[in-house]
Image (cartoon, rainbow, N blue to C red):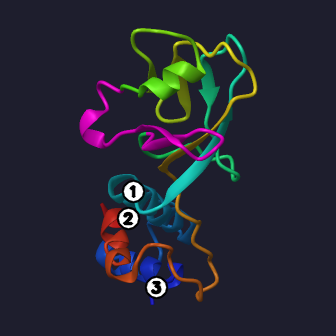
Amino acid sequence: MATLTNLRAEARNLLDDAAADRFSDADLAVYLSEGQVEFSRRTMLFIASYTLTTAAGTSTYSLLDGRGNAPVGPVLRVENNTGKEVFHTSEEVLDNLQIEDNWKNMTAPAARAWLRGKVGYSTVMLYPTPSLAGVTYRIYAPGYPPAMADNGVTDSSIPEHYAYALPFYAAY
């Protein structure tokens, strides 16, 4: 099983620190959690949804999930309040994010409309600046994996055949 207890023991073995002289349990738990986040960012396994409601004249919005975490990767998809996709991307096109005409029609007329991540992935900017208040969008982006419980029973949220890479990340 890929529990925090088992993964921490494997990391201790790799670090030759069986007596916990150099790394506390808390330190290793942090490193293993960082490994989960990095795994989530790279594989996009945990997709979280964020709600953004426009305010007239406001172009910058914060993205936080229900636990107060920002996305760990780029915005992948945006849907309007009826569930219609108005934007999607992949990592390959992040440098030139273009949003389709239906996005432009919901904000203000412009030759080019875009959504861009700013300050890591915790903030997005919309252009053109929305002219309507109360328009709601559902944004999907790679999110934080659920935290590992330190109870010796609960598995890591990462699939087991990948979770065993976490001690190597912690040891690195």
At 58% from the left and 50% from the top, the residue drawn is: 49
Could you tell me the amino acid type at mark 1? Met
Whichever of labels 3 and 2 marks the residue nearer the N terminus, that label is 3
- Residue position for label 1: 44
Q: Position of residue 166 (x, y in %)?
A: 37, 70
Res. 135 visible in picture: yes
Circles 1 and 2: CB atoms closer than 8 Å: no
Q: Which residue is drawn at 51% across and 26% down?
A: 103
> Residue 153 — which label?
none
Residue at far left of view: 92
Q: Residue 28 appears at what percent x and percent y?
A: 48, 67
For image coordinates 30% across by 69% down, the residue present is: 168
State how far apart marks 1 and 2 are (Cα).
20 Å
Distance from label 1 to label 3 (Cα)?
A: 24 Å
Going by the image, does 37 lie left or right of 69? left
Q: Mark 2 points at which residue?
A: 170
For residue 27, side relative to residue 165 (left or right): right
Quarter of the image holding residue 98? top left
Amino acid type indicated by mark 3 = Asn
Q: What element carries label 1?
A: loop
Give the mark nearer the N terminus: 1 vs 2.
1
The magenta segment is: 75-97
- Residue designated by label 3: 6
Q: How far apart are marks 3 and 2 (CA)?
A: 13 Å
Crowding near the residue tagged with mark 2, few <14, some 14–19, many ≥20 C-alpha atoms within 10 Å: many
Which image quadrant: the N terminus? bottom left
